[in-house]
Image: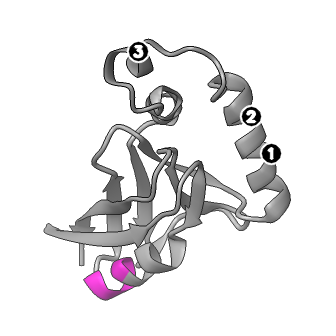
Amino acid sequence: MKILSDTLIYNTTADTDIIDITPEVAERVRGSGIEQGFVNLFVPGSTGALTTIEFESGAISDLKDAIERMAPKDIPYAHNLRWGDGNGYSHVRAALLGPSLQVPIIAGNLALGTWQQIVLCDFDNRPRQRRVLLQLVGEV
């Protein structure tokens, strides 16, 4: 059993960045030598999330629109009243999607569907430097 940890770093702008991180994760998986196992991904912070989607402009636009419908920016949030930072919607959006994702590794590759990519979502209302923590676990 082999266990490796790694960190990916991304600079975001503000307000619902969705970044395809699949190439970097796949590179780490290939470099690990793990043939069978999984990679666990986690974004520290309460305004970032991870999910999968077909990373093309229509699907990304649809995801952003759905997120806006679920947790609109322009409604009152108790978090904003308490802290005054205006990002209450960011916390709710991140909580709905979640901070982690696990993908199987089969034959040394990510077991993603043909049109499925791993995306980092940053919902904060200011630029951030986001870390994505990876743990690769499996047999070589």
Per the model, the C-alpha gap separating discs 2 and 3 is 25 Å
Residues 71 and 118: in front is: 71
Three-letter amino acid code at disc 3? Leu
User: Label 2 neighbourhood size at 10 Å, few (<14), some (14-19), many (20+)?
Assistant: few
User: Label 1 neighbourhood size at 10 Å, few (<14), some (14-19), many (20+)?
Assistant: few
Assess whether residue 107 is covered by the magenta stretch. no
Q: Are marks 1 and 3 in contact (CB under 8 Å)?
A: no
Q: Which residue is mark 2?
A: 66
Q: Are marks 2 and 1 in contact (CB under 8 Å)?
A: yes
- Residue 5 can be seen in this image: yes
Q: How many marks?
A: 3
Q: Quadrant of residue 38?
A: bottom left
- Left/right of residue 78 with respect to residue 68 in the rendered view: left
> Residue at position x 43%, y 12% from top?
78
> Residue at position x 53%, y 64% from top?
111
Q: Which residue is mark 3?
A: 81
Three-letter amino acid code at disc 2? Ala
Q: Earlier in the sequence, mark 2 or mark 3?
A: 2
Instruction: Please give the range of residues in magenta.
Output: 28-32
- Left/right of residue 54 with respect to residue 45 in the rendered view: right
User: Image height check: is 123 above or below 1?
Assistant: above
Residue at the front extreme?
Answer: 84
